[in-house]
Amino acid sequence: MDRSFAQLAGHHFDVLICGGGIYGAWTAYDAALRGLKVAIVDQGDWACATSSASSKLIHGGLRYLETLDFKLVKKALREREMLMKAAPHRVWPLRFGIPIFTDSRLNTLLLKAGLTLYDFLAGILTTDQAHRRFSRTQFSERFSCLNPESLTGGFTYLDAQTDDARFVLELIDGAIAAGAVCVNYCKVTDFIENNGQICGAKIQDNVEGNTAEVYARQIVKATGRWITESESRLSKGVHLILPKILENEALLLTAKSDGRVFFMMPWYGLTLLGTTDTDYTGDIEHVTVSVDEVDYLLTEANRVCKTVNWTEQDIIGRYAGLRVLKQSSNATPTDVSRDWELKTADNGLLMSIGGKFTSAREDAAQIVNTVCENLAINEPCKTNGRSFPWLEEMDYRLWFDTAMVKAEEQGIDYESAQWLIRRHGKRVVEIFHLIEQDPHLSWRITPSLPFILADLMFCAGNEMVVHLEDLLRRRIPVLILSKMTQAELRHLAEITANILGWDAATLNNEFETCARKWLLH
């Protein structure tokens, strides 16, 4: 994945996409596969905002059944089922438990009905993937972290999990392979119009500072919270990373204070707790986690857990993101639909507003359909059911097992090997080659996390890393998964500098910038 501003400057494209989150990435990949000449830019890194601040789920949204948003749930569940088949390395099944307490907002009968409908919409009602009901004793044994007092039983049901930042990165790499020009840290400073119609953009290279003009027959704005659309509404979601208390299943819980649902999930061997859902009107450039939001999540988690009494000191990492919602008269963001819409400005600019990570592919297909219609191009969507770019062509289970054997032979521990294969798919063979040249690269970056040095080096050298934060927050999310010391961060910065050719001044600047943002709260 090579970054080249020169491939943009002065060139003409069929479509220029502004925004490198999940919607922009799917749009670029889809359009490139249809044979369009595509460019995509982001003022920051790929998935640097909301698309790396999600709950890491590919799910239908069980709670939307309460608001009777059946169309949205069915759409998302259809995508979930497709993605688990098209990208088993990128999207893997995760079962959720729903405990029922004597004071639960929803009783057993209502939950049974909702889960039956959820499985029906997903097409798995009569399979072994369907929801299951458990007695109090059975559920308590399955989720030993829960406080058994007032517990009456529970259900489990199927959804799926991912690494959101790597999901986006794989699509960007797929777009590049299909001929798209993809440049991160490239800001659109203004649009160019001809006779009142948009025909290009003035762009600035945020790395070298160069400016240029790029021309396109259509321009799509998929910039999320930077859409500056008067009819949109922002909602803030916060997540915390805490010590491990779950194994291979997650929990969907209901907050006693306000009745909304939140999740407790295993992720990279730790616990991901979230999310909040509150209106946001602050600075969109600097979204932080507040004390009140931390207190809310810890209080609600501690209320249902018997094995922990988490405090601020237990928090390993934290992050916040902003969802773009349709403008609504509903009092709380939780009650606002997560559906998506495409708007066309008077000058022809296409604007993608709202939506969900899970259903972004189908929405992006509609964006590209509109582009093709406007350009008189007759090419159907090619992303539905298509294997992801990094998926090996042979049977996935057989390939995965073979790769695990190879990893073991190279001295990679079992947990790190599993994550390595999920993170890189078929490209894992290139990481194996690095270890063959230097066996020490099979060692973990830090003992507590399942990431090895060869992974770090491969990402730094091959995944369009510009800044240290790109590498340590999104390519490998160690900044939110560990309480890293300055010495540890400095060591990783030095490794990165050797690979990217940073001089001493650049190294120091990258280290200081990253430390200031992530090591000091």
Image: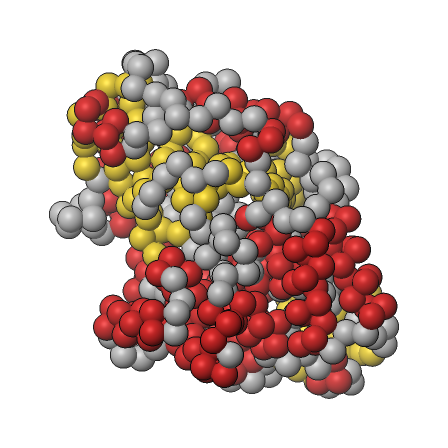
Q: Residue at x 66, y 36 (%)?
A: 289
Where is 33 relative to 511, above or below? below
Furthest-front residue in this view: 440
- The quarter of the picture where the N terminus appears is bottom right
User: Looking at the image, can residue 367 be seen?
Assistant: no
Where is 27 relative to 101, above or below? below
Q: Nearer the viewer, residue 194 or 84?
A: 84
Where is 476 relative to 389, above or below? above
Q: Residue at x 48, y 38 (%)?
A: 243
User: Looking at the image, can residue 61 be seen?
Assistant: yes
Residue 223: % across, % down: 66, 57
Residue 287: % across, % down: 70, 42
Residue 247: % across, % down: 34, 43
Q: Nearer the viewer, residue 153 or 32?
A: 153
Q: Nearer the viewer, residue 230 or 171?
A: 171
Quadrant of the rendered structure where residue 504 is?
Answer: bottom right
Residue 298: % across, % down: 53, 27
Quadrant of the rendered structure where residue 483 is?
Answer: top right
Q: Horizontal placement of 110 versus 359: left or right?
A: left
Q: Nearer the viewer, residue 61 or 411?
A: 411
- Count of labels shown? 0
- The quarter of the picture where the C terminus appears is top right
Q: Residue at x 77, y 62 (%)?
A: 510
Quadrant of the rendered structure where residue 474 is?
Answer: bottom right
Where is 171 relative to 445, above or below? below
Q: Residue at x 67, y 49 (%)?
A: 485
What's the coloring here?
secondary structure
